[in-house]
Amino acid sequence: MSSSIAFALVFFLLSLSPTLSLPSKRNSYVQNACRVTHYQDLCAKTLSPFASVAKNSPSKWARAGVSVAITDNKDVLRYLLKTRLSTVGKHDRVALSDCRELLQDSLDSLHKSLAVLRTLRASEFQQQMSDLATWLSTSLTDKDTCLDGFDKTSTKSSTVRMIRNRVTMSLYVSSNSLALLNKLAANGLQSHKS
């Protein structure tokens, strides 16, 4: 009787083995994809939910990166729209207003990018990569310009500090999406369906 219990236990543990190795496989997909980014920890944290779908596909990782950047950009824009102008100084009110507009432009660029990433074609691949690089770079520039608008001396304002932190993190997320796009451009479309 004890040998049949031991056999059942061994069989049960062996049946769990693929399940136990699955998270490490997903982690290796994410780590491999994020290796090309400047903010690898942030990349791994934000993109890990896509690992089981994206696996080793540069196009799926690029799409995931832009999707995450869109969600993040929307969250920051929502925060900026809720921020009352009365909570910041006179100079920073103008910067906040400009920043709202810049983040909306950034969001538009990200949406255009995602639309193209969903329709990649071998016959248009080089032009699509060029357009995508332009739009994602524009998204980064918009966020950088937003940050530049705030008075560097207004560090006492918790609202301005929070805005800077949120926009900076969003800039990092967008930077990661551009790095993933560059990896796709370097690998070409042949690996896009894998």
Image: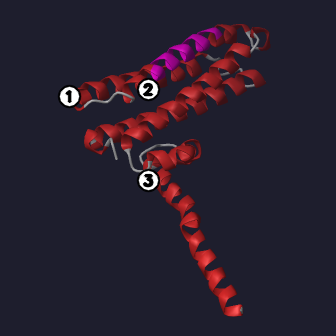
Residue, far left? 123
On the image, numbered disc 2 is attached to which residue? 114
Q: Earlier in the sequence, mark 3 or mark 1?
A: 3
Residue 159 left/right relative to 132: right
Disc marking residue 32: 3
Residue 5 location (% of width, % of height): 69, 86
Residue 158 belongs to magenta span: no
Label 2 SS:
helix
What number of labels is visible?
A: 3
Residue visible at 57% across and 45% down in the picture: 49
Left or right, residue 52 beside residue 128: right
C-beta proximity under 8 Å, tags 3 and 1: no
**Relative to the observer, which residue lies in front, 45 or 9?**
9
Residue positioned 74% across, 11% down in the render: 89
Q: Which mark is residue 148?
A: none
Q: CB atoms at circles 3 and 2 under 8 Å apart?
A: no
Per the image, label 3 sits on a secondary structure element best described as helix
Q: Quadrant of residue 16?
A: bottom right
User: Marks 3 and 1, how far apart in space?
Assistant: 28 Å
Three-letter code for the amino acid on which mark 3 is drawn: Asn
Above or below for 148 versus 10 = above
> Which of labels 3 and 2 is toward the front?
2
The picture places residue 74, in percent across and down from the top left corner, at: 61, 22
88 or 117: which is nearer to us? 117
Instruction: Give the residue pinned by disc 1.
Output: 123
Seen in the image, is 64 located left or right of residue 117?
Answer: right
Residue 107, magenta (yes or no) = yes
Q: Which residues are magenta?
A: 97-111
- Quadrant of the rendered structure where residue 104 is? top right
At label 1, the amino acid type is: Ser
**In this view, 7 is above or below 97:** below
Predominant secondary structure in magenta? helix
